[in-house]
Image: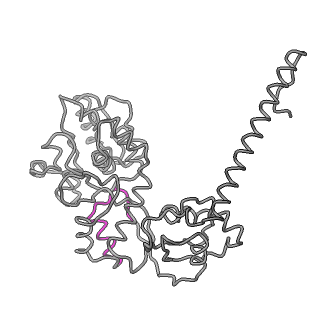
Amino acid sequence: MSFFPQPQNRASAIIFLIVKLMFICSIIIACVIGGIYAFEVGYEYVKNPTQFENRVEEGDKVQVEIPSGASTEQIAEILKQKNLIKYPILFRAVSAFNRNDGTYQQGLHTLDTSMEYLDIMKTLQRTVVIRATTRFTILEGHELRHIIDVLESQRLIDREKFMDAVENGGFNYPFLSDLPERENRLEGYLFPETYEVYLDATEEEIIRKMLDQFNHVFKPEYYERAKELGMTVDEVITLASIIEREAQKDDERPKVSAVFHNRLNSNAYPLLQSCATVQYVLGERKDVLLNVDLAIDSPYNTYMYEGLPIGPIASPGQKSIEAALYPADVDYLFFVARPDGSHVFSMTLREHENARIQIQRR
């Protein structure tokens, strides 16, 4: 089958021939330019390999972990992320030319930012001691206290050291910039996931592993969407954590989000009135909240204070984060839970009261 449609007459045949020749010429020119560039890069590398090193600082030691079964392409990307190389494609080409593919050893290697490509390859070919690992799982909706309990039960952390790292550790991530002063500084940011860590990992290394996962999940477009909503990243995660605690069914998360967004923009119902925020203050998840519970004076009590609480109340999963950023286009202001965890949504207080009564009668 021809790429070009066949011409129907002599005039169109001439035009067709001209277009075809121009198309072929453009491909040839692109190939020539690409070939010249590739040749120049390779030639410059042969003359002076060190110019291709993206040094952080001359002689810096950098630890690089090579996963089991990692390809040369994956290894090159890891090295680039660590600022040890600048051109992953060139690293792969040099590795293939020297027949080094498949010879790199898994484990934790110590490299130097002054190393050339071949020196890095030689180091990665050396066998290193494989450190014992273990796994732990953080569930969506886990609070910081639950996360600490999980890690402590597996004897991975010292509780006091972990909390000190949470409150005072130097973690340089864009989503942690400009956090307000509050306790449990990293609440909401230790992303729910199953992790594999070294048995001798430090508290700070474990925290960084979870923050790395949050950084991976929280996409660049999420930052832009937060700006469109007039919200900070911290406000988005705070809202997402409430959604995580209130909604059990994925298809309802955008609707729950819409209720809270509508209330944040409502003069008639400015209080979010989320039971989950009061439960966070109580430190327990009571099925029924009493009036005395709702009267607790806390910046997390959304029955007492308008707007979002001072910070997240749990670790939200990606679906709750997306719901916070992209609420459903509905006018609901209320919801009440059914026994199966689903909700009835209402636009007026009367509809809401009727729904609540109907659920209680069942």
Q: Position of residue 79 (x, y in %)?
A: 53, 65
Image quarter (top left, top right, bottom left or bottom right) of the C terminus: top left
Q: In the image, is 348 to the left or to the right of 122?
A: left
Depth check, front residue: 226 or 105: 105
Name the residue located 23 percent from the left edge and 66 percent from the top edge.
168
> How many circles with numbers are drawn on the protein?
0
Q: Position of residue 44 (x, y in %)?
A: 64, 60
Name the residue located 32 percent from the left edge and 44 percent from the top edge.
338
Q: Is residue 153 magenta?
A: yes
Q: Is residue 265 above or below residue 177?
A: above
Residue 172, located in which quarter of the rendered image? bottom left
Name the residue located 68 percent from the left edge and 73 percent from the top edge.
100
Chain part drawn in magenta: 138-154
Q: Position of residue 114 (x, y in %)?
A: 50, 71
Name the residue located 25 percent from the left edge and 28 percent from the top edge.
348
Identity of the residue furthest to the front in this view: 47
